[in-house]
Image (cartoon, helix red, strand yellow):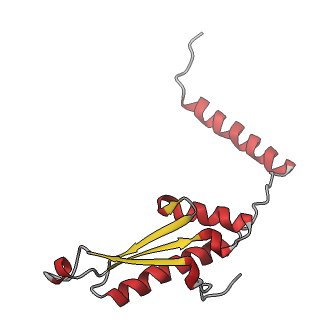
């Protein structure tokens, strides 16, 4: 999925709550609940098992019993914080839909191994030349 726009999250899977925020807003912060706490019920999305596992890994500490909790309090208004929380959640779900490319193991060729051994031998002779001369 190479879409730049994250997938739309169904309203039935979202639960929104507003609480008192910290940060910018002066005395207004103490009076108005502007921070948005958004909870997404992941089971309602009916994701494929591999996408579900990636989403759980991406959510990290925001994951709790089948739901993801995102708190947005960067802005001074409810609307801006609501949009920020929804955008961050949608980005996380979109990121989980991206399947990582499988790594193909490679191994050095016979010639490369021979070159490596040869350079090691050369380096060893250089270092031997630096040693104190042995008096027999």
The answer to which of 15 and 86 lies nearer the viewer is 15
Please report the residue visible at 79 percent of the width from the left and 55 percent of the height from the top: 105
* Left or right: where 72 falls relative to 42: left
Quarter of the rendering containing residue 83: bottom left
Q: Residue furthest left?
A: 27
Residue at the front extreme, as displayed: 12
Residue 23, position as x, y percentages in the image: 23, 75
Name the residue located 26 percent from the left edge and 75 percent from the top edge: 20
- Residue at position x 66%, y 87% in the image: 3
**Residue situated in front as seen by the camera: 4 or 84:** 84
Give 59 or 33, whichever is nearer the viewer: 33
Q: Residue at x 77, y 47 (%)?
A: 115
Q: Quarter of the image for the C terminus: give it.
A: top right
Task: Say above or below: 124 vs 3.
Answer: above
Q: Position of residue 27 (x, y in %)?
A: 13, 81
Asked where in the image residue 95 lies, by quadrant, the reply is bottom right
The number of discs equals 0
Image location of residue 36, percent across then percent down: 37, 78
- Name the spot of residue 107 as percent of width and height, x first: 81, 51
Q: Nearer the viewer, residue 64 or 90?
A: 64
The quarter of the picture where residue 71 lies is bottom left
Q: Is residue 120 above or below residue 29?
A: above
In the image, taking residue 39 as reference, residue 52 lies left or right, namely right
Q: If the image is split into quadrants, where does the N terminus sit?
A: bottom right
Q: Residue furthest top?
A: 136
């Amino acid at each position: 999925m190479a879409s730049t726009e994250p997938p739309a999250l169904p309203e039935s899977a979202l639960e929104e709550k507003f609480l008192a925020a910290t940060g910018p807003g002066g005395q207004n912060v103490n009076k108005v609940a502007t921070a948005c706490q958004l909870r997404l019920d992941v089971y309602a999305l009916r994701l494929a098992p591999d996408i579900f596992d990636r989403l759980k890994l991406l959510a990290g500490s925001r994951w709790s019993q089948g739901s993801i909790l995102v708190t947005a309090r960067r802005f001074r208004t409810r609307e801006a914080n609501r949009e920020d929380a929804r955008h961050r959640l949608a980005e996380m779900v979109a990121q989980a839909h991206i399947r990582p490319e499988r790594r193909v193991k490679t191994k050095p060729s016979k010639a490369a191994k021979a070159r490596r051994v040869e350079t090691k031998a050369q380096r060893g002779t250089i270092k031997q030349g630096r040693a104190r001369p042995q008096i027999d």
